[in-house]
Image (cartoon, rainbow, N blue to C red):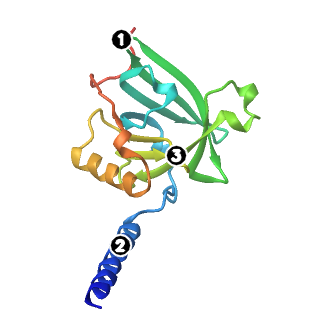
Amino acid sequence: MRKRLARLLAAASLCAAAGAAAGASLPNVPVSSVDLARYAGTWYEQAHLPMFFQRRCVADTTATYAAQPDGTVGVVNRCRGKDGRFEEARGVARTVDGRTSTLEVRFAPAWLSWLPMVWGDYWVIALDEADYRWAMVGSPDADYLWILSRTPQLDPAVHERLVAQARAMGYPVDDLIATPQRSQDATPRD
C-alpha cells in the first residue's frame, strides 16, 4: 500500500511539474499592433533560424523597410556573402486582415503576386514598444525567426530575454545562427 501511495504521489508531482512547465509556455502570437512609420528604417539582424534563402549570408545582414503611399511596405534585405560582396533582395510587405503586426512579404516579381505561395508570413512577435530599438519576427508555424536591432550590437540581456521568449513560444532556438555585424555601417560600398 505504501509503495502504491508513493508511486501515486510521484506521478502526481510529475504531472504537476509538467503542467507548470506547460503553463510557462507562451502562445505564438504577434504583438497587438506596430506603427509601421516608426518600424520603417534599417534593422540589423542579430540572429536567425536557418533559412534556404539566407544560406550564402555570412555577416552584416540588414533589413530596411519603407512605408509606401499605397499602405504596403518596401523591403530591402542585404547581407555580406562569403566572397565579401553584398547581396540584396527587394520585396514588398502587406498587412493581413488590417493588422499591422501580421504581415506577408513577397520577393517574387509583382506579376506573380496573385499566387499565395509567393507570400511569406512575417509576424512581429516582440517589440520594444517604447523606442522601437529591437524586434523579434516569427511565423505562425515557428519555422522562421529573426532577432533585430536598430544598432549593430544588441544588449546581450535583451538578446537573452528574446531567445527565452521565443523558446517559450515554441521556436527551435537551439538552431539559431548568430549574425556577425562586422562594421558599424553595414551598407554596401562596392
| Quadrant housing residue 105 | top right
Q: Which of the two marks, 3 or 2, is nearer to us in this view?
A: 2
| Quadrant housing residue 121 | top right
Q: Amino acid at mark 1?
A: Gly
Mark 2, residue position: 20
For marks 3 and 2, give the CA distance. Answer: 37 Å
Q: Nearer the viewer, residue 45 or 25?
A: 25
Q: How many marks?
A: 3
Where is residue 140? Give x, y as percent: 55, 51
Q: Residues within 10 Å of mark 1 (few under 14, many from 20)?
A: few
Q: Amino acid at mark 2?
A: Ala
Q: Nearer the viewer, residue 169 or 180?
A: 169
> Which label number is shown at residue 36?
3
For marks 1 and 2, give the CA distance. Answer: 48 Å
Image quarter of the C terminus? top left
Mark 1, residue position: 84
